[in-house]
Amino acid sequence: MKNVLKITAITIFAVLLSSNIFAQKDNDRAGLDAQFLVSSYEITAGECVYFTDMTTGNPTHWLWTFEGAQTPTSTEQHPQNICYYHPGVYTVILEVQNGAMVNTEVVTECVTVLPNNETPIADFTANYTTIPENGVVQFTSLSQNGPFASYQWTFEGGLPSSSSEERPTPISYPHVGQYNVELTVTDMNGNSDTETRNLYINVVPQATVRPEANFMVDRTYIAPGDAVNFTDRSLGNPYIWHWFFEGAVPTTSNAKNPTGIMFPMPGSYDVELVIESNMGIDTLRRENYIVVAEADPCVAIPEAEFVASPRLIRSGTKVYFEDKSTNNPTAWTWEFEGGYPNTAATANIINGIEYNAAGFYDVFHSVSNECGVTSVLKEDYIMVFSGPIPLYCDTITNIRPNEIPTSPAVTGSWGYIGGHNGQRIKTYADKFNQYSFEQVEAIIVPVFKSQAGSYNSYVTFYIWDGNSLYPDSVLAEKKILLRDIPENYNYVVEFNEPVKVNGPFYAGYKINYNGTNSNGEGDWFVVSIAPSRSGSGTNTLYVSSGESWSTAYEKFGIRTSTAIRPVTCIVDIEDYAADHEISIYPNPASSIVNIDLGSVEYGKDITVDIYDMLGRKVATQNCNSSESNIEINVSSFSEGLYFVKMNIDGHSVTEKVLIAR
């Protein structure tokens, strides 16, 4: 019976009058004002309506929440065939966005559904709609206006695939995928009705690790009466969700991604998520997570910051962005070069930004409150490739394309600006302002001069955190004997583990003065630098002779950079490896590397390729997962970091292993 009713003048008038005071937001003055019409405000159970967006202010995104409807949400501008099966009075929420603003319309008592006691209404429920592979689902008919002469179920992807019972025996789903379910009921007079729910059953892989709860919300600061939307970002393939929303309407949800959660009263409210899988239960509670206030509580100018996941992607993949700004921003603006959509105005991008063309793309994020506005631009932050790639590495440098590194002497003293000199500079640090890469694998050091004054003389190489005015927190260090470092040579310093960085970092070195003098005796270590730049040139080099830091300009009178080139990488998080518990041991290794295949299915062909730091393939081995453990002889390999890339049943898995003796 599910008829779509035509729009009437009285419907338009009634919906516009029924908008309550919570629909009037401060954002209205900016021109974005969410409004809509419904084809009928009063229907009979089993009928459907459609909605027409009437928003002003050039919206680009729509998110509808339909309380009590068979289709609970929609991102269409004008949703069609929104069907209601059960009598009641239901709220409709519309959230709209443009490139700079968000606005919400909450219409309580929007749709009244009257009882239908005459014709069949096919309806059903399932005890679970997300299950692990080989899981079972119990379906129950909720059809109205029986008794019924027959039931006909169709279970796409299920075993059995059909049933004529009112309450079928549990249906098992052996394969991962999303499947339709259909029910047709026929009454004693031959009248029938059919309900089809597309992609109703979601079958996920069996979990192999304990679940780890995580979630995002589109906005954390809202006005009273606003509604927010949550998305699950948990790891480990959970299939049961229990949400608890303090101070909200509703207060709980069992949906994976609850939408239209309204907070009517000012205050700060907790949100808790409990997830389950076949491997266990995990809980995440965020205290004072949602802030509801009438006015902007300005404390300080916000500091813009954000993170994204994943960042190394195949074309056609979505990226999710999370605001990490401090000092309570109340408005957010995003610009996504190369993404679709390319703008957003919520705090967190819970529905993802899709990238369809290969390339490296910038992301701009601006936040504000009544105190002021700040922004951050992360260049080449999203890396998109035409095919899957688990790892991308490159060298970065502060040397400009037209600059030739040099090794100038210190004016008025002995020694060199990039190393030992009469001013007894001990530590050199070059700042790299970049957001493209998330870890430093090594640094390539152009050594101009290297001389050991004693057998045990050494130099220590460092990576420091770069989110401060001067080098402060040491992220990694490695001591190298001077006698092992050739001069006039690009020396590669490999760290024992990849060094995790979050945006800017410093790379450099610290030297000793073991008998060093102007006669050339004792220790000497000098690194090439950029030639002196003009008065408006950029300086990235910082030096220290003790506890305090200075710029190269303050100490030597020149603006310059070292010619050190960090080897930086971004690594895709390969779910296949985690889901199947694939691991490599020992690590570091000396002669034999073992690959534990975990729960990889028996009989799969596997190709193992090993690459060195320069991307050269140094070994290939063909195997089969009938062996639970693969052994690789690396006794002939030089010491250093290698990448073990496995192709398993079409899945690419890359792990790192350090060869050390």
Image (cartoon, helix red, strand yellow):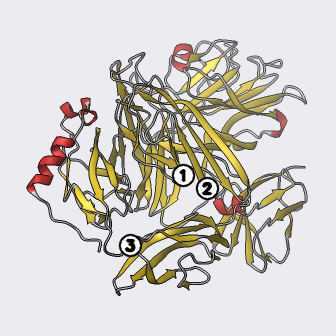
The image quarter in which residue 468 lies: top right
Secondary-structure class at tag 2: strand
Depth order, front residue of 435/430: 435
Q: Write down the residue under mark 2.
A: 240
Which amino acid, by three-letter code, is at mark 1?
Answer: Asn
Residue found farthest to the left: 9
| Tag in front: 3 or 1 | 3
Depth order, front residue of 457/623: 623
Depth order, front residue of 270/96: 270
Q: Position of residue 315 (x, y in %)?
A: 46, 63
Q: Position of residue 625 (x, y in %)?
A: 79, 75
Residue 395 seen by the camera: no
Q: Position of residue 510 (x, y in %)?
A: 72, 25
Q: Write down the residue under mark 1.
A: 254
Calculate the distance from the C-alpha at mark 3 to the C-alpha at mark 1. Answer: 28 Å
Secondary-structure class at tag 3: loop
Secondary-structure class at tag 1: loop
From the viewer's perspective, tell me whether residue 627 is left or right of residue 18.
right
**Contact? badges 3 and 1 (CB < 8 Å):** no
